[in-house]
Image (cartoon, rainbow, N blue to C red):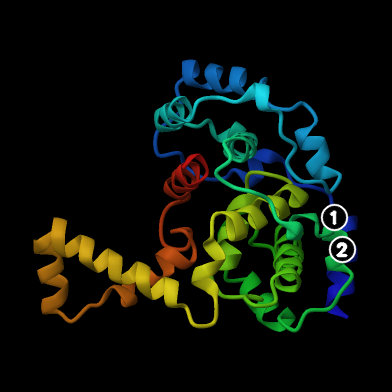
Amino acid sequence: RHSVVVFRARQEEGECTLSDKLEYQELTPCLKEITAVWDKMLSLQNSELQKDIEDGDDFMLEEEKKVPRAKLLDYVKKGVPRNLRGQIWLFLIQQQLMDGATSYSPWSNASYEGLLRQLTTHQHAILIDLGRTFPSHPYFKTSLGPGQLELFNLLKAYSLLDTEVGYCQGLSFIVGTLLMHMKEISVFHVFKYMMYELGLRKQFKPSMTVLQMKLYQLTRLLHDHYKDVYDHLESHEISSTLYAAPWFLTLFASQFPLGFVARVFDMVFVQ
């Protein structure tokens, strides 16, 4: 019953303004000249891309509009304007797909609306976590407000799409970060891309073997490059599991300022 109520409520709610969704402090303001460069780069983007995504289609590719990866990385390092960040993330994904680094699979054609009409066994767990996800952010702080309703829909749809992972704590913060920057249907496609094409879903599998591997890698990096920090943590018997698991499970979104988190996502999409 909750599924039907939430889905209908989404249709009846008015959308928040972009400024409401982008309520966070940038690490460093993006310079005007860099913003101008991004405006020009976005003009290279397939003009039908956003419309296709909003219509439920996936990313469309046009090879003649490929931008060299080194140039993209350079511009991302120089800064990404907050008000264009969602468009730029879509652009970077499109560029990655052109590069041949990824290849879409049959799952990419899953119907979002079709998934929303189904029932999920993870509904209770998802509903509980809604209020715990960015609880002070204007877009998500209202109980069953527009932000929480969209968050519920997306997490529900993914739990039905990927039955092996289903729903896992941490996913709501990743989806919430995306929702701050783009429309609901765009988030659905981008989240699928992150989970399947970028391999993020591997760390959410029931065994969580990949998560344990990442925690071990972090420990080794500390040992090899920051030995004093490693020794200090070891002397207090503080393992990486105690502090870093939420970093990986939420892509840092639950533990760090949103301006920093947005920059992490910038780098994820460009690399």
Per the image, the residue denoted by label 1 is: 13
Type of the residue with mark 1: Glu
User: Mark 2 falls on what kind of element?
Assistant: helix
Residue visible at 74% across and 55% down in the picture: 108
Q: Decide: few, some or many residues near mark 1? Use Cα within 10 Å; few <14, some 14-19, many ≥20.
A: few
Residue 191 visible, this orientation: yes
Q: Is residue 269 above or below residue 87?
A: below
Q: Is residue 141 above or below residue 51?
A: below
SS type, badge 1: loop
* Residue placed under numbered mark 2 in the picture: 9
Instruction: From this view, report whether residue 36 is shown above or below residue 203.
Output: above
In this image, 115 relative to 150: left or right? right
- Residue 135 appearing in the image: no
The number of numbered badges drawn on the structure is 2
Q: Amino acid at mark 2?
A: Ala
Left or right: residue 68 versus residue 5 is left
Quarter of image, res 107:
bottom right
Q: Quick one: 9 or 121, which is closer to the camera?
A: 121
Using the image, tell me which numbered label, if any, was put on residue 96: none
Q: Position of residue 238 (x, y in %)?
A: 22, 78
